[in-house]
Image (cartoon, helix red, strand yellow):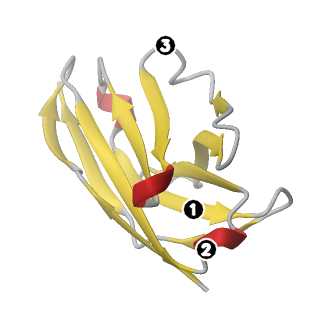
Amino acid sequence: QVQLVESGGGLVQAGGSLRLSCAASGRTFTMYRMGWFRQAPGKEREFVARISWRGGIADYADSVKGRFTISRDSAKNTVYLQMNNLRPEDTAVYYCAAGSARAYDHWGQGTQVTVSS
C-alpha cells in the first residue's frame, strides 16, 4: 500500500499563488506515476497534472497549462503542484494520486483550494 498526505491548500485572491505538497509513504517503489486531480462542488473529478516518477515527464490539463507546474522530489517521496495566477474557477478540492501506468490505485484525502475574486 501507498499512503498519500496532501498539504498546502488554503484561501487566496485571484492572481495569487499556492503550492500543494503530497508526501508518499509505504510501498513507494511501486509508484510509476503521480498526479493531481480536483473536484469542484457539483462537478466531476478532473485531471490537473501528472508526472512520471522516474523520468519526471509532466503532462497538464489545458486549463492549467502555463500556470501550474508539477514536480517531484524522489529523495523525499514528495510531489508538488505550484499554482500561479490562480482563478476563481480553480476553486476545488485537490487530490493527489499515485499508481501504475494503467490506473491510479492510491488517493490522498484532499486539500481545499479556494480562490476569491
- Kindly state the secondary structure of the residue where label 2 is placed: strand
Where's residue 53, x and y in %? 64, 50
Q: Secondary structure at mark 1?
A: strand
Residue on which disc 3 sits: 66
Left or right: residue 17 versus residue 77 is: left
- Contact between marks 1 and 2 (CB within 8 A): the answer is yes
- The percent coordinates of residue 33 (x first, y second) are 68, 53
Q: CA distance from mark 1 to mark 2?
A: 6 Å
Q: Residue 50 got which mark?
A: none
The residue that disc 1 covers is 97
Is any atom of residue 105 visible in this view?
A: no
Query: In the rendered view, would you say 107 is above or below 114?
Result: below
Q: Earlier in the sequence, mark 2 or mark 3?
A: 3
Neighbours of disc 2 within 10 Å: few (<14), some (14-19), many (20+):
some
What percent of the width, then of the height, locates residue 106?
61, 74
The three-letter amino acid code for the residue at tag 1 is Ala
